[in-house]
Amino acid sequence: MNNKHRRRVLLALDAANSTLEALEFAAFLATELEAKLQGLFVEDADLLQVAELPFTREVVLFSAQERRFEGGALDRSFKIVAKRVQMELARVAEGARLSWSFETIRGRRIPLLLEVGASSDVLIVARPRQKRWRPESGAQLSASRGVIYLVYTDTPSAEHALITALVLARQKGRQLVVLVPQKSKGQTSLAARVAGRLTELQPQASVREMASPTGVENLCKHTGGEAIILPADMAEVQEPAWFQSLLDKVRCPLVLVR
């Protein structure tokens, strides 16, 4: 499998989703795809705007006391977290011998993610409470129970998304579940086409038809999904409301592949 067309893996982080697990996952994928790793720390402009409102308050964690939520303090907190994340990214990337870069950008989170996703080879959106992504072998591989979910659509990016899913499933010893839209009347079944491809590439993978991609987040939660991979040109991805809903529900990395 030739992955040299992959040039950049972009990891989108923010103050609430900047875990070591996310960095390790991105570094693992960048290594397997022979890509440069780029960290993007998003300062949420909507949150900063809320902080400037005169009636906004915060509750201090240890004292339970209420105090005014100030935009200046939030801005300083963003910079502190971004600096810490940059240092961790450097450590993880250099440990994996990866070329890397880091950038901080301010804007509305969902529109910004959709914008950078449109120009990235692979975009990983970090989510909280992820499992550690470290190389495994032998008995560890056979004991792995995580599932890699791929939503496969009849779009140009679907094949690249399939390659990415196969890399993760093979190298991590995970089960690959490919979700495809149910065929329309008179159309050749997309599920049958994908099943044919998987017979030669990943015989252990399974293919499921679904009425729409909107149920993928529930599958991920109920079966211990470790990553959801989507073609970046999938129609639903371009809808901010659907994308926000997906991010709100999943607790595993969300990977957009172009």
Image (cartoon, grey):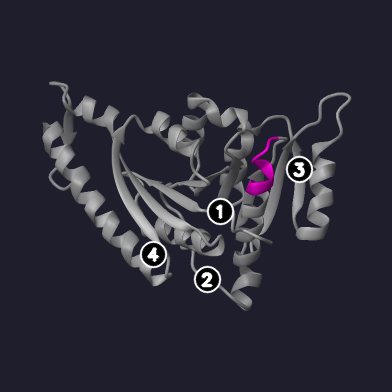
Viewer-side label of 3, 2 = 2
Q: Amino acid at mark 1?
A: Arg
In screen coordinates, is 102 left or right of 244? left
Image: magenta residue range: 155-161
Query: What mark, if any, has residue 135 been given in the picture?
Result: 2
Residue 191: give x, y in percent of width and height: 80, 41
Q: Which residue is mark 3?
A: 208
Q: Residue at x 62, y 43 (%)?
A: 219
Q: Earlier in the sequence, mark 4 or mark 1?
A: 1
- Residue drawn at the location 57% of the way across and 39% of the way down: 217
x then y, percent, for residue 82: 25, 49
Q: CA distance from mark 2 to mark 1?
A: 21 Å
**Helix, strand or loop at disc 2?**
loop
The answer for how far apart the CA atoms under marks 4 and 2 are is 15 Å
Mark 1 falls on what kind of element? Answer: loop
- Image x and y of residue 239, in percent: 53, 25
